[in-house]
Image (cartoon, grey):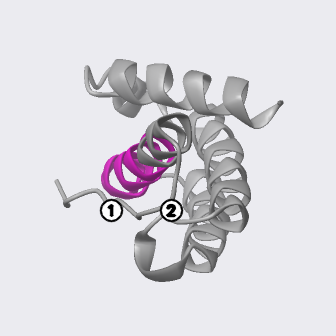
Amino acid sequence: MAKLSVTRGQTPAERARFALAESACQLADQLLGELASTEAAAARLRTLRVYWRKVRNGKVLSAADFNAAVDVCRSAERVLEALDAPALADPRLESLRRQLHAMLKLGRH
């Protein structure tokens, strides 16, 4: 997994929030990229990646990056809904679902 970024001048809460966002997005992109075998899932994955590219260099460093990361996580939820049964059986999805849930909860505030 890629090294998470840390920026000076951020509060510990911001660093934790941004690290969660970055980790969730990286996992979603990597894992769902492997599992999106249906046409619907692949289409939703392309949308996820459009939002992920809006995060500068894949690093969540600011509030704007965090907002884009929330969009990535919302798109990841849509990809999950479009996965076929064999892909849904992948045990790695549980970790992704936990991270997405935590991110979307933070994104509502």
Q: At 43% across and 81% down in the image, what residue appears? A: 57
Location of residue 88 by image quarter? top left
Disc assigned to residue 60: 2
Magenta extent: 20-37
Q: Residue furthest right?
A: 109
> Percent from the top left, x then y, of residue 8?
41, 63
Badge 2 or badge 1: first in the primary sequence: 1
Residue type marked 2: Val
How many numbered discs sit on the rendered protein? 2
In this rendering, the answer to whether 67 lies above or below 93 is: below
Out of 84 and 96, give the one closest to the viewer. Answer: 96
Q: Is residue 6 magenta?
A: no
Q: At 64% across and 37% down in the image, what residue appears? A: 77
- Residue position for label 1: 5
Q: Secondary structure at mark 1?
A: loop
Q: Specify whether 60 is left or right of 40.
A: left
- Disc 2 residue crowd, few under 14, some 14–19, many 20+, Cα 10 Å: many
How far is mark 2 from mark 1, CA to CA? Answer: 7 Å
Q: At 28% across and 56% down in the image, what residue appears? A: 4
Location of residue 42 by image quarter? bottom right
**Disc 2 + disc 1, Cβ < 8 Å:** yes
Residue type marked 1: Ser
> Percent from the top left, x then y, of residue 97?
48, 24
In this rendering, the answer to whether 102 lies above or below 16 is: above
Q: Specify whether 75 is left or right of 90.
A: right
> Percent from the top left, x then y, of residue 87?
37, 33
> Percent from the top left, x then y, of residue 74?
71, 43
